[in-house]
Image (tube, grey):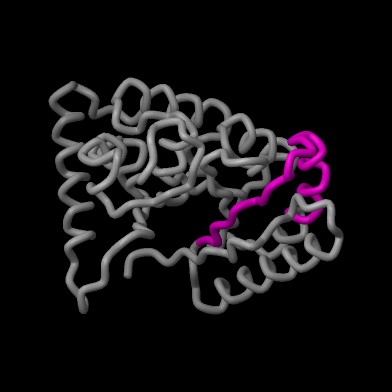
Amino acid sequence: MRAVMCHALYLVNLASRDGEIRAKSLESLRATMETAHAIGAEAVVFHVGSHLGYGFDEAVDLVTPALRKVLELTTDELWLCMENTAGAGGTIGRSIDELAALCDALDGHERLGICIDSCHWWASGIDVSDPEALDRAVAELDARIGLDRVRGLHVNDAAVALGSNRDRHERVGLGTIGDGLATFLGHPAFARLPAITETWEDKGGETEDLDRMRALRRRGARRRAARGGTRRT
């Protein structure tokens, strides 16, 4: 294995106004960090949670103290990575602006990272299949947060339309993004990052899904090179 990243429970909600839920979410996230450290993982990926409609600004005030505590468990080898969301309801992290606001609230902590999910970007309105749209998103990510904070990718196709704000994954290459995932995987900004697929079909050890993902990455890199876009954005 070249990289190990752990994913915290989806039930974590550091933005809940319910103190008990917030405390249990913090406890769960801390436990995941401790496990990740014990097995030598490189990152813990998590969803910040949902403000359930009361507003993002107030949510930042609730989330920040909890994240400061979790960040105390990071090391040079183990980072804490926020994942972007599809944008349903009051979920936090639906845009680069929201992720950047959290980074700023935490004073740009040196081991606070980002995990980009292709399906979530698509569902939140970023067309990862379009080279120019993806270039704009990557440039904004670099300017607002820094590409050095992007520590990994979740490579999922989508079972929903662009901009639908619904979190519905599909197997790589078989959804509404389809062959367009080659553009995402072939972007030079992501070339050296761990690429993890969360949606697959297990047929007793066959690697069909991973093979398809690798083929898409090669295809995307070739197309990028043909466009003269080998330079890292």
Residue 87 in picture, x, y percent from top left: 56, 38
Q: Residue furthest right?
A: 19
Answer with left or right where residue 74 lies relative to residue 54: left
- Relative height, residue 69 to residue 202 (above, below): above
Q: Return the residue nearer the eye: 163 or 208.
A: 163
Q: What is the quadrant of the C terminus in the image?
A: top left
Q: Quadrant of residue 188?
A: top left
Answer with left or right where residue 121 lies relative to residue 201: right
Residue 172 in picture, x, y percent from top left: 27, 51
Q: What is the quadrant of the N terminus in the image?
A: bottom left
Q: Which residues are magenta?
A: 43-67
Total marks in image:
0
Q: Quadrant of residue 211?
A: bottom left
Look at 29% across and 54% down and name the residue there: 171
Look at 49% across and 34% down and name the residue there: 124
Q: Return the residue nearer the eye: 123 or 96.
A: 123
Look at 44% across and 46% down and name the residue there: 117
In magenta stretch: residue 54: yes
Residue 154 in picture, x, y percent from top left: 40, 52
Look at 68% across and 34% down and name the residue there: 101
Residue 214 in picture, x, y percent from top left: 20, 52
Q: Return the residue nearer the eye: 220 or 168.
A: 168
In magenta stretch: residue 189: no
- Relative height, residue 125 to residue 204 (above, below): above
Answer with left or right where residue 98 lies relative to residue 36: right
Answer with left or right where residue 49 lies relative to residue 39: right
Q: Return the residue nearer the eye: 106 or 223.
A: 223
